Amino acid sequence: MLNFQSIRATAMQKAPYNWALIKNLLSTEASLELAASFPHEDFRLSEGEGYGYLWRKMFVTSEDISLMLKFSDNRWRERIAAGRFTYDLGHLSNIWRQLIEELWTDSYRAALGDMSGLELKDCAMGIGFRKYNLGHSHHPHTDEPNKVLTHLLFFNQQWSVNWGGCLRILKDSQPESAFQDIVPLSDSSVVIVRSNNSWHMVTPLTSPVSESRLALRVAFFRNVA
C-alpha cells in the first residue's frame, strides 16, 4: 500500500531544519478508503496552555512496548501502565489494519532511514490517530528530547487554507515566523527530524463544525540515557 519509492525519492529540506514533504505516499483509492473508515470513537482531549487536540491510544508492537519499559524516562512506564499503548488492531477496518501493519515493517523504517540519513532500527515506534476540530490548535514546539523523527500522514480529501489546521514549519519559536504552511490534504505527508530548533505547530482551526482535521502520527523514540 505504501509507496516506499516516494519516500526514498524525496529530498530532505535543510532549512530551517531537517524536514521533508512527501507527496503521493498512498494511492488516491487507498486514501479515500482510509478517510471513509477513519475511526471517530475513543478519542480523548489533550489540552494545555496554547494547544488542544484529540488523541487516541498509540499502536505499538509488543517488542517496542518491551523496549519502552527499559527507557530511563519514567513517563514511558507510566503511560504503559495507564493503558495508553496497544498492539490490538482488531477494532480497525481492514485497510487501517493493513496500513499499520505495513508501517510496522522493516521496509518502512529502512525507507525513512535512507531518506533522512538516520538509523531507526533500534528505535521504538508509536503510531497514533490525531483529530482536530473547530478551535483546536497545537502551539509551537520542538517535540520531546527522546523523539528522533516524526512522520505525519494526512487524510482530508478537501481542506481550505482559510480553515487553519495547517502544519506550520517555523523559523523559530514564534507562531508568526512561518517558513512554510502545509495544508492537511491526503496527497501529502511530512517528516520532521527532531532537533533543538525543529519548531513547528498546527495553526488554529476555524473550519466548519462538520470538518475535522484527520491525521496519523508515526513517531520514533530512542532512550536518551
Image (cartoon, rainbow, N blue to C red):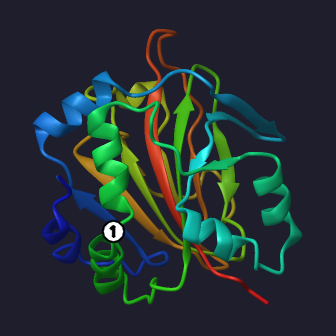
| Residue 132 place in picture, x, y as percent | 56, 30
Along the viewing direction, whichever of 210 and 130 lies nearer the viewer: 130
| Residue 84 place in picture, x, y as percent | 71, 47
- The residue identified by callout 1 is 105
Q: Quadrant of residue 190?
A: bottom left
Give the vertical position of 15 relative to 225 (above or below). Answer: above
Q: Please give the name of the residue rendered at 82% of the width and 64% of the height, measured from the top-left corner.
A: 77
Q: Please give the name of the residue rendered at 26% of the width and 37% of the height, measured from the top-left corner.
A: 95
| Residue 113 place in picture, x, y as percent | 36, 83
Neighbour tally class for label 1: few under 14, some 14-19, many 20 plus, Cα within 10 Å? few
Image quadrant occupied by the C terminus: bottom right
| Residue 89 visible to an observer of this rendering | yes
Q: Left or right of 139: which side holds 161?
A: left
Q: Left or right of 225: which side holds 92?
A: left
| Residue 212 place in picture, x, y as percent | 47, 23
Describe the element under mark 1 as helix, strand or loop.
loop
Q: Amino acid at mark 1?
A: Thr
